Image (spheres, grey):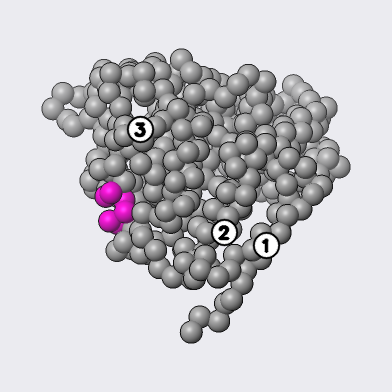
Amino acid sequence: MFPFTSLSFTSVSPHSPDQETTLTIDGAQLQVGLQYTETDGLKPLINWLDGLQKANHGRSKGEGWRVTPGCGSQDLIYKAVQCMVNPGDAVLIESPVYAGVIPIFASLNCKQIEVETDAYGICSSSLRKTLEQWPKGKPKPKVLYTIPYGCNPTGVTATTDRRKEVLELARQHNFMILEDDPYFYVYYGEAPRYPSYFQLELDEPEVGRVIRFDSFSKILSAGIRIGFASGPSVLLNAIDQLTSTANLQVPTLTQLIIFRLLDSWGYDGFAAHVQRVGQFYKEKRDIFERAMRKHLTGLVEWTSPEAGMFLWIKSLRVLLPRFKILLTDERAGASSVSGDAGDSETVIRTRAFANDVLAMPGAPFIPNGGRTPYVRASFSLIGEDEVDVAMQRLRETILQERAARKAMATLGTSTTREESLDEL
């Protein structure tokens, strides 16, 4: 009694973007797509993804791993954490980090242990120090969450050396690596891609310490909501059990649409498509950085991303220049507010917004909260003319705020609470 008899869609050719191809799903194939399917995925799509992991990460069947689909990689990350982490556990999480994962750990009342990052990705030295100084008698974390390519929000990509060191620490201290990699296929660096954790663990004495999360959201469609996890079968079986009770399965029809497209392209066509995606975002990045150099040189600093669609911009002590104001309160005594560290939150939500600048203040990306002078900007959507206007507005915002803060600093080093709150 299902009323659908045929489904057709048109896609561009990965080899010739000016050419379009119409693909049709009908007959017995459509009947499969209209029905329930196994929780662990539509078999033709899973087989295709197995081959993709072989082509890009050198992983073969029979190594104790498999692939399972999810309604986006976020769905799979949530379920993996639910399966592996107990309420109150300590977890290792790179910082700054994708804001969407923080509530996952917070919902379990986890103690989020922040691991520093820099221009070369996660700081393995910071991770090593944390683990070697772990309090005796307290269980060590079971998982580390990291985004190794074009991290949201920082845009940085972890080097091979850093990844190898993290893998070694995972073996030494017995934790799993949650490799969230939605920007692996949005890469535009000059050098070949760094090998993934999933690939590198083949060189370790053992495999099975990595659960890898891939996504089609950035390269095919965000709205179609399909991602997939690759990792130890025992853990993916647990994820599938959770899926079967939560939402049964990823919709068969969307799996079929994705498979029909990928199967028509083949692995060479898919590689050509993601190369074009990377080139598109490289051009976006270059336009954005040219405008930043034109308008913001001397006011901010940043690391040029090699993947993804984000820039992590640090103000050079201009949003909160060096000053200290003493606040007096009859009930609480004296306290101080220091501007040494810098903070983008208030400026972005007030003065920047008033100047028609929309950006993300850095604070939501800090797992345990705190002040930060950083701002995340996305270069994925706006055009070149708009970018230039945006950078002009951001420059004006920074200069206005710096002037206001300097004027406030000249008020003196001590004032009453009533006199200072409005100024702050």
Q: Mark 1 points at which residue?
A: 9
Q: Is residue 251 above or below residue 377?
A: below
* Residue occupying image coordinates x 66% and y 59%: 23
Most distant residue in the bottom direction: 1
**Mark carried by residue 257:** 2
Q: Give the side of residue 301 with respect to residue 45, left or right.
A: right
* Residue occupying image coordinates x 22% and y 30%: 140
Q: Name the residue under label 3.
A: 210
The answer to which image quadrant residue 137 occupies is top left
Q: Mark 3 vs mark 2: which is more N-terminal?
A: 3
Residue 2 place in picture, x, y as percent: 51, 80
Per the image, is 49 magenta?
A: no
Foreground disc of the pair 3, 2:
2
Q: Which amino acid does label 3 sit on?
A: Val
Q: Is residue 181 above or below residue 324?
A: below
Q: Circle 3 sits in a helix, a strand or a loop, which is it?
A: strand
Q: Circle 1 sits in a helix, a strand or a loop, which is it?
A: strand
The answer to which image quadrant residue 397 occupies is top right
Dot 1: within a 10 Å radius of its alpha carbon, few (fewer than 14), some, or many (20 or more) residues?
A: few
Q: Mark 1 vs mark 3: which is more N-terminal?
A: 1
